[in-house]
Every structure is written in C-alpha cells, then in structure tokens.
Amino acid sequence: MKMKRYEDIEPSNRTTFRMLYYNVGRTLTQIETILKRAYGNPLPIKPQDRLFRIRHKLEQMVARYKQSQEDLKAEYQKRKFLS
C-alpha cells in the first residue's frame, strides 16, 4: 500500500476528526482480529508491536489536534476581546 504525500491531500469538510478516529480504531481492531486468526493468540511480538505503534501514533495525532483546537479557540477569544 502506498500512502499519498501529505502535501497532496486537499482539505475536506465532509468528515470530522472524531469520526475518523473511531473509524481507524475499528479498522485496527479488525486487522488485529485477522492477524490473530492467522498467527494465533497471542500475536507474535512484531505484528503486535506494529499495531501498538500505529495506535500510539493515532493517539498522538488526536492529542495534537485537540491542542490545535484549544490554541485556535484561545486565539479567537483573545482577538474577540481586543476588538
């Protein structure tokens, strides 16, 4: 699977970040289930580690997005107060 370059992705108003987060979470769970069927339970260390790394990066993205929202909200309030 080849990912698009970050710069090539156009902005979109059709989805919310919350919706995307939960969709990716469900997809990761489905991949984990498929891998457990293929390799057995518990998963071997490498596939399990890679799933955890993806989940962790997703959580970091959500944390950064929330921080950006808070920063924008504070900036808006600051400008509104100064006007």
Image: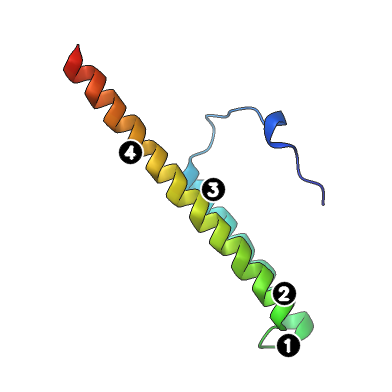
Q: Give yes or no for contact between labels 4 and 1 (Cβ–Cβ under 8 Å).
A: no
Of tags 4 and 3, the one toward the viewer is 4
Residue shown at 67%/88% (left/top)?
41
Circle 2 residue: 47
Answer with the quarter of the image where residue 26 lies: bottom right
> Considering the numbered disc 4 on the image, is that residue within a helix, a strand or a loop?
helix
Amino acid at the residue labelled 3: Leu
Q: Which mark is residue 70?
A: 4
Is disc 3 surrounded by few (<14), some (14 to 19) or many (20+) residues within 10 Å? Answer: few
Q: Residue furthest left?
A: 81
- Which quadrant is home to the C terminus? top left
Q: Which mark is residue 40?
A: 1
CA distance separating discs 4 and 3? 19 Å
Looking at the image, residue 30 sits to the left or right of residue 80; the answer is: right
CA distance separating discs 2 and 1? 12 Å
CA distance separating discs 4 and 1? 43 Å
Amino acid at the residue labelled 1: Gly
Q: Which mark is residue 20?
A: 3
Mark 4 or mark 3: whose residue is earlier in sequence: 3
Amino acid at the residue labelled 2: Pro
